[in-house]
């Protein structure tokens, strides 16, 4: 079993060091001078943007300012309500229940329930932001990352959506940096690899290491190693009811 790079806790409980928080203060000064909305973001948000750009103040401030501009347009009232994305929610593509052994909230994503011919791209992007916000509200104190299982059982060409996949990745990487801990891709059909090759160049190097392809013979052991039986859904042999 290849677990790739598993990113665990980098959260409120780790404290950080003095040099890191000094960098955060520098980023705040730069960002607030250009956009007063930066004052509304806490230091942990700024630290994630710094980490995503290897603590380069210039690059992190550019990224943060782009996020603030996106947030104003996408979430003018502060959040996206379930009613706004009701048409996407009823497709039941995502379940969010349970935690892995590192205390990260889990999301289970079902690729065969997505049909690009029936989706509006702008509406889909709002749904992606809604899902990311929802799972972030489930983060326990001291944890800033979530984990996911992408189940591709039954996935076929009718489900393939390169534009949608790239859009979702861009939202996660650009506006929710350092939130993803690990993703298991399971029941992966051979034909999906052609789509993966097209999407792969759009994934940044740090994020690439967080995707783990699990072959069927290793599935049970891999999931049980990562997730306690009480937190593992029944459909994967655990005791959690989704």
Image: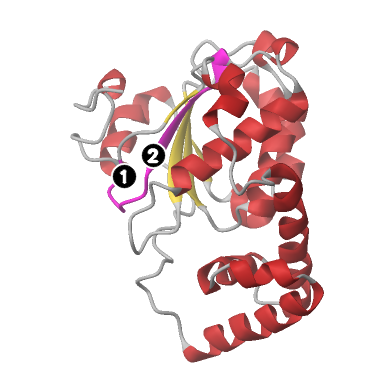
Q: Is residue 196 something one can see in this rendering?
A: no
User: What residue did someone put label 1 on?
Assistant: 100
- What crowding class fits label 1: few (fewer than 14 Cα within 10 Å), some (14-19), or many (20 or more)? many
Q: Is residue 228 left or right of residue 35?
A: left
Percent across and percent down for residue 46 are 60, 70
On the image, the x and y values in percent for residue 117 come to 74, 10
Segment tinted magenta in the rendering: 99-113
Q: Secondary structure at mark 1?
A: loop
At horizontal 43% and vertical 35% (from top left) the residue drawn is: 107
> Do callouts 2 and 1 mark residues in contact (Cβ within 8 Å)?
yes
- Whether 132 is drawn above or below 7: the answer is above
Q: Is residue 240 above or below residue 179?
A: above
Q: Is residue 112 magenta?
A: yes
- Viewport quadrant of the N terminus: top left
Residue drawn at (40%, 69%) of the image? 12
Q: Is residue 200 visible?
A: yes
Up-down: is 177 above or below 34?
above
Q: Position of residue 74 (x, y in %)?
A: 71, 43
Of residues 130 and 241, the one drawn nearer to the viewer in this rendering: 130
Q: Which residue is mark 2?
A: 106
Residue 177 point in image, percent of width and height: 61, 57
């Amino acid at each position: 079993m290849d677990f790739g790079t598993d990113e665990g806790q980098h959260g409120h409980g780790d404290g950080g060091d003095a040099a890191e928080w000094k960098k955060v203060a520098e980023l705040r000064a730069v960002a607030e001078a250009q956009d007063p909305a930066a004052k509304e973001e806490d230091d942990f948000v700024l630290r994630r943007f710094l980490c995503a750009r290897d603590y380069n103040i210039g690059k992190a401030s550019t990224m943060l300012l782009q996020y603030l501009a996106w947030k104003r347009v996408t979430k003018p009232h502060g959040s996206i309500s379930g009613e706004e994305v009701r048409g996407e929610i009823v497709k039941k593509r995502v379940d969010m229940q349970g935690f892995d052994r590192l205390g990260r909230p889990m999301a289970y994503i079902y690729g065969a329930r997505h049909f690009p011919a029936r989706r509006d791209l702008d509406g889909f992007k709002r749904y992606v932001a809604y899902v990311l916000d929802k799972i972030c509200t489930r983060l326990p104190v001291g944890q800033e990352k979530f984990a996911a299982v992408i189940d591709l059982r039954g996935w076929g060409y009718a489900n393939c959506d390169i534009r949608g996949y790239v859009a979702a990745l861009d939202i996660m990487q650009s506006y929710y940096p350092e939130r993803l801990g690990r993703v298991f891709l399971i029941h992966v059909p051979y034909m999906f690899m052609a789509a993966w090759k097209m999407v792969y160049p759009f994934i940044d190097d740090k994020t690439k290491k967080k995707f783990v392809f699990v072959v069927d013979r290793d599935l049970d052991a891999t999931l049980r190693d990562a997730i306690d039986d009480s937190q593992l859904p029944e459909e994967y042999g655990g005791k959690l009811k989704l």
